[in-house]
Image (cartoon, grey):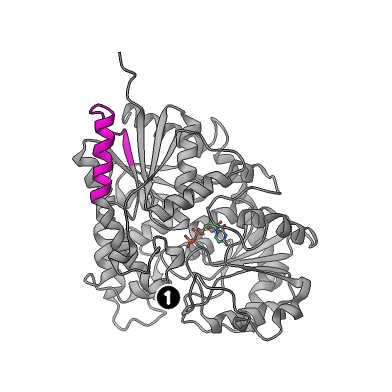
Amino acid sequence: APPPPPKHIIMLPFMAQGHLIPFLELAIQILHHHPIFTISIVNTPLNINYLRSAIANRPSPPPSQIHLVSLPFHSSDHHLPPNSENTDGLPFNQIIKLFHASTALQPPFSEFISDIIAKQLGTPPVCIISDSFMSWANEVATSFGTVNYTFTTCGAYGTAAYDSIWLNLPHRNLVDGGSHDEFPVPGFPESCRFSISQLHQYLRAADGEDEWSRFFQPQISMSLQSNGWLCNTVEEIEVFGLEVLRNYIKLPVWCIGPLLPTKMLKGNTGLVGPRSGKQPGIPPEKCIEWLDSHPPRSVLYISFGSQNTITETQMMELAKGLEKSKKPFIWVIRPPIGFDLKGEFRPEWLPLGFEDRIGKQGLVVHKWAPQLEILCHVSTGAFLSHCGWNSVLESLSQGVPLIGWPLAAEQGYNAKMLVEEMGVCVVLTSGIHSRIEKEEVRRVIEVVLDGTEDGKGEAMRKKASELRELIRASVEIKKGSSYKAMSDFVSTILFGFK
Ligand code: UDP
């Protein structure tokens, strides 16, 4: 008799580093739970190359049952510059084109599934796990008689707010649209109000007919038709957010996070190893050496993630504030708004003589830093972050409090939760239109690193350490909530719902 067809899982991440990285980690962890599966991760050629290098760069090779599958995609067919298949190379105002272009993958994706079914003598994949931004995969799954799970690479609170605000546009009921106006969000308790300043500029202007609404409203609606959701979070750290999310989407939610290298969750510092296919602007060993020369919890790490960037004026003021604070820092610099994101670093983005003056006080890293190594190091005391969810989880898993500067997507909601629910963050400012002042930068850094202003910094650090312990406990074999959720998810794929 021929061997039984493989239990094939298909994964479809969105084309951004913050999505590719957790998807790969998800594939690895599913296989650690059960080696029976074959997992194909499907994407465009450039993103498959990123994943291929990410796999090659890993300190230990991932399970061989992971296959990478490239679908044909030409960014120039979608009015995008050549080789623009990931948000990391696109200015923000062009990212929406990439979102719309991603739906062009549906026909080749369907063809790929139908080839698999033919190869497996009529047996469909056991499931398709699609990104919450690629929910058209739900139609494909249904048409081939298989099930579809949505994987949100964001947290529960952020996802619930993001989805509800896009679907309902509740801020449109406000009369004057001033930046301090607050509004309730369907699904959230009346008392938990959101404000215009937490919304990205494109969302502020959305009316249901614009190009952002035309992408997000149908994708979010379709994700609500899937069979269940995986969320890169931990039950115990997002109790409120999960209650809201579950009530809102009315689907099973498995919290299987944090999708981070195991080494990071065991209190090991040192080399964690790269997770993306990107080359860091500094060798991780050099970064560690630099951090070794600073006292525990003294260094501020600054990064705005893989796709966002601030303006030249904001960068200047941030630099002056850092200099004034006299605190050691590592700052990942990507070209400011308006400059070619793939271009080289230009000294004129920083105050004249900045790098000479700061000397050992600061380490300026170009474009991409070994973030995990930095956050795992005892010398790192705080993270000035755009509050992208991966960065948040990475920081909290090490007990590092945050200074928030949300820029896009659901980052403003993450920052709100970090402040109001978790008490581990101070928001410095938000967006690219705000005026930041060097004095304010210095003040906030001191609050968090020195514990000025009634020991607020100390309280934040304590809360962050408590969250670190909850996160670490969640992955404990057989006992932790995330471990159990993953086991339950795997048996649901294999045997259906209990
Ligand atoms: N990252 C990194 N080095 C950098 C910038 C980002 O390793 O210089 C990684 C970071 O560790 C995280 C991911 O890229 O895993 C960024 O995801 P996040 O959700 O924080 O933000 P996004 O880039 O999606 O806005």
Q: Up-down: is 347 above or below 385?
A: below
- Where residue 315 sits, quadrant-wise, is bottom right
Of the pair 487 and 270, the residue shown nearer to us:
270
| Quarter of the image with the N terminus in it | top left
Of the pair 375 and 183, the residue shown nearer to us:
375
Residue picked out by circle 1: 197
Residue 149, visible in the rendered structure: yes
Q: Which amino acid does label 1 sit on?
A: Ser
Place of residue 204 in the rendered image (x, y in percent of width and height, measured from the top left)? 34, 75
Element at badge 1?
helix
Q: Which residue lies furthest to the left in this view?
A: 143
Residue 225 highlighted magenta (yes or no):
no
Residue 110 highlighted magenta (yes or no):
yes
Place of residue 284 in the rendered image (x, y in percent of width and height, measured from the top left)? 68, 55
At 24% across and 43% down in the image, what residue appears?
111
Place of residue 40 in the rendered image (x, y in percent of width and height, measured from the top left)? 38, 39
Place of residue 234 in the rendered image (x, y in percent of width and height, measured from the top left)? 50, 46
- Where residue 437 sits, quadrant-wise, is bottom right
The residue carrying mark 1 has its beta carbon less than 8 Å from ligand 1: no
At 34% across and 18% down in the image, what residue appears?
3
- The magenta stretch is 107-128
Q: Up-down: is 382 above or below 142?
A: below
